[in-house]
Image (cartoon, rainbow, N blue to C red):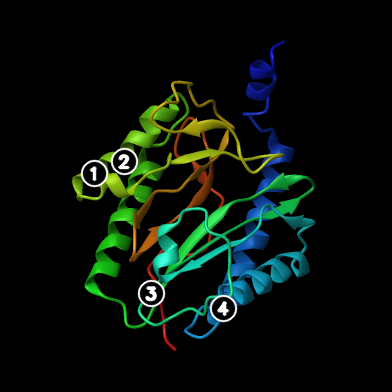
């Protein structure tokens, strides 16, 4: 069997694998809600990342899925920014991308908050990203291709005038590695089988200003997908 064939065998997760990923997602959800009060002006990105990683381990994670991303203000326009000593400012988006590991299986989640005062632009960008995510969750089914899934979200973002600001694929498989096949991208022609665990993570990134990404982890099914990420998706405006 080819390496590609071996990789595809990993796409479909059995019940035990999904249970481990579900547990990892639940630990990450609880940890994020625990550290949410830290996401206020004056706290550094690195302080938030360290607190979140500690909370996941204390909550039962065997480890963290990847180096936690905390990116605030103009740095939120960098999709893969690492946490720095930059203090979070007022009136800024803060992207937090994080995950836990349980029994070797990973989770992956992103939430974006805004520090008060939120502007009309913050609310507009967030609403477009959330609409793209919810539209995908409403239509994602086994039998779709990765390209078709990506197109659902991408068309919403393009229609809102932010197409050039969504520069990455919609998602990827998650399991024993935090990045596995299949991809949800304009170039993925493979069909999504039931039991595949993927991220759905639309985003808008505006250089010099900031960015927003909202990411859920889901199990693809013949009907509606199971959304493993339970952290609320409504925009949170954090007061100082």
Label 4 environment density (alpha carbons within 10 Å; few <14, some 14–19, many ≥20): many
Q: List x then y, in percent, for residue 60.
A: 77, 63
Tag 3 or tag 1, which sits nearer the N-term?
A: 3
Q: CA distance from mark 1 to mark 4?
A: 33 Å
Q: Nearer the viewer, mark 2 or mark 3?
A: 3
Tag 2 or tag 4, which sits nearer the N-term?
A: 4
Q: Which residue is mark 3?
A: 92
Disc 2 + disc 1, Cβ < 8 Å? yes
Between 73 and 120, the one nearer to me in the picture: 73
Disc 2 + disc 3, Cβ < 8 Å? no
Disc 4 + disc 2, Cβ < 8 Å? no
Q: Which residue is mark 1?
A: 158
Q: Which residue is mark 4?
A: 44
Disc 1 + disc 4, Cβ < 8 Å? no
Circle 1 SS class: helix
Tag 4 or tag 1, which sits nearer the N-term?
A: 4
| Extreme residue in the bottom direction | 240
Residue 239 vs 62, above or below: the answer is below
Residue at the (20%, 50%) spot, across then down: 160
- Picture disc at residue 154: 2
Q: CA distance from mark 2 to mark 3?
A: 24 Å
Q: CA distance from mark 3 to mark 4?
A: 13 Å
Quadrant of the rendered image containing residue 109: bottom right
Label 2 environment density (alpha carbons within 10 Å; few <14, some 14–19, many ≥20): many
Quarter of the image with the N terminus in it: top right
């Amino acid at each position: 069997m080819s390496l590609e064939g071996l990789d595809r065998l990993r796409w479909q997760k059995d019940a035990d694998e999904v249970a481990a990923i579900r547990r990892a997602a639940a630990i990450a959800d609880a940890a994020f809600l625990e550290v949410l009060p830290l996401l206020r002006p004056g706290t550094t990105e690195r302080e938030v990342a360290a607190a979140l990683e500690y909370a996941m381990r204390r909550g039962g994670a065997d480890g963290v899925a990847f180096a936690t991303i905390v990116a605030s203000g103009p740095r939120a326009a960098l999709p893969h920014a690492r946490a720095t000593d930059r203090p979070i400012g007022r009136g800024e988006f803060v992207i937090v991308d994080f995950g836990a590991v349980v029994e070797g299986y990973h989770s992956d989640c992103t939430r974006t908050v805004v520090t008060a005062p939120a502007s009309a632009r913050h609310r507009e960008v967030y609403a477009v990203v959330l609409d793209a995510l919810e539209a995908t969750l409403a239509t994602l089914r086994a039998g779709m291709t990765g390209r078709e899934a990506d197109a659902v979200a991408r068309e919403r973002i393009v229609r809102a005038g932010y197409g050039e600001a969504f520069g990455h694929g919609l998602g990827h498989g998650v399991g024993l590695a935090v990045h596995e096949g299949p991809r949800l991208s304009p170039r993925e022609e493979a069909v999504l089988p039931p039991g595949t665990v993927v991220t759905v993570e639309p985003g808008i990134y505006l250089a010099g200003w900031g960015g927003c990404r909202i990411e859920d982890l889901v199990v693809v099914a013949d009907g509606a997908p199971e959304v493993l990420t339970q952290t609320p998706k409504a925009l949170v405006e954090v007061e100082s």
